[in-house]
Amino acid sequence: MAKMILVIEDETAIQNVIRAFLEDAGYTVALASDGLEGIRQFRAHRPDLVLLDLMLPKIDGFAVCEILRGESRVPIIMLTALDDDSSQLKGFDALADDYITKPFSMPVVLKHIEAVLRRAEPGAAPGGVIRYREITLDPDSMTVLVGEESVFLTVREFEILKLLLENQGRVISRERLLDSVWGYGYIGSEKIVNTHIKNIRKKLGVDCIETIRGAGYKIEKET
């Protein structure tokens, strides 16, 4: 069955271009032209991925992202003309999975979509269950438990935590995290990694990720 993508974009010309490329690539597409309609369409269709503009009528994209994220862990890619670091960090704070600035190349956008969907697929991260102190991470179901309590992580947060847990005692540089989680084609600020680490720490509530100044991050081996 074809994956469905919800495009929340207020410019009709951009909507039409995105829809044409997505449909040619085999996706089913739903469209919304403002934030409120985007939320309604999301609840009606339950898409596999959302492409979200930020400067939207009625409710902006940041607020839409926070509302959708409160209801689902569906992958969200922000498409926006806001290319400053603060906007990108705000987007990731709202738990977006990716952030692409305008003007963009649709073939590149399609590759981002494929990568995000691939990471979100159940079983996309092969390997056995990882247990560390009170943390249990299951790559097949993409679930994380702290004790008996389920912890909600975005796809990228999950991949970061998994990489650190698989490399206990080793320092993982920001560059390696960007290459492994965002992909080798990522162009942007390394501050994005800091934001994701901050979110993971807050959600886990467990003091296990150590910052190695000037080098990266690590999780100590369990003794």
Image (cartoon, rainbow, N blue to C red):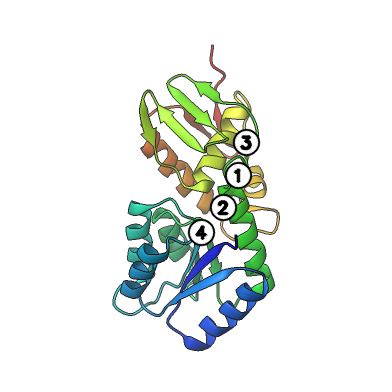
Tag shown at residue 48: 4
Label 4 neighbour load within 10 Å: few <14, some 14-19, many 20+: some
The answer to whether the residues at label 4 and label 3 have Cβ atoms under 8 Å apart is no
Q: Can you give x and y, in whole percent of width and height, for residue 55 in the image?
A: 39, 76
Chain-order first, disc 3 or disc 2: 3
How far is disc 1 from disc 3 in space, using C-alphas? 7 Å
Tag shown at residue 82: none
Give the amino acid at mark 4: Asp
Element assignment for label 2 = loop
Q: Which residue is mark 3?
A: 172
Tag shown at residue 190: 2
Q: Which numbered disc, 1 or 4, marks the residue closer to the eye?
A: 4
Q: Which numbered disc, 2 or 4, marks the residue closer to the eye?
A: 4
The answer to whether the residues at label 3 and label 2 have Cβ atoms under 8 Å apart is no
Give the amino acid at mark 1: Arg
193 versus 169 height, above or below: below
Element assignment for label 1 = helix
164 versus 9 height, above or below: above
Tag shown at residue 174: 1
Q: Can you give x and y, in whole percent of width and height, for residue 51 in the image?
A: 50, 68
Q: Nearer the viewer, residue 99 or 50?
A: 50
- Return the residue found at the far front: 1
Give the amino acid at mark 2: Glu
Chain-order first, disc 4 or disc 3: 4
Identify the residue at horizontal 67%, vertical 70% (top origin): 25
The answer to whether the residues at label 2 and label 1 have Cβ atoms under 8 Å apart is yes
Label 2 neighbour load within 10 Å: few <14, some 14-19, many 20+: few
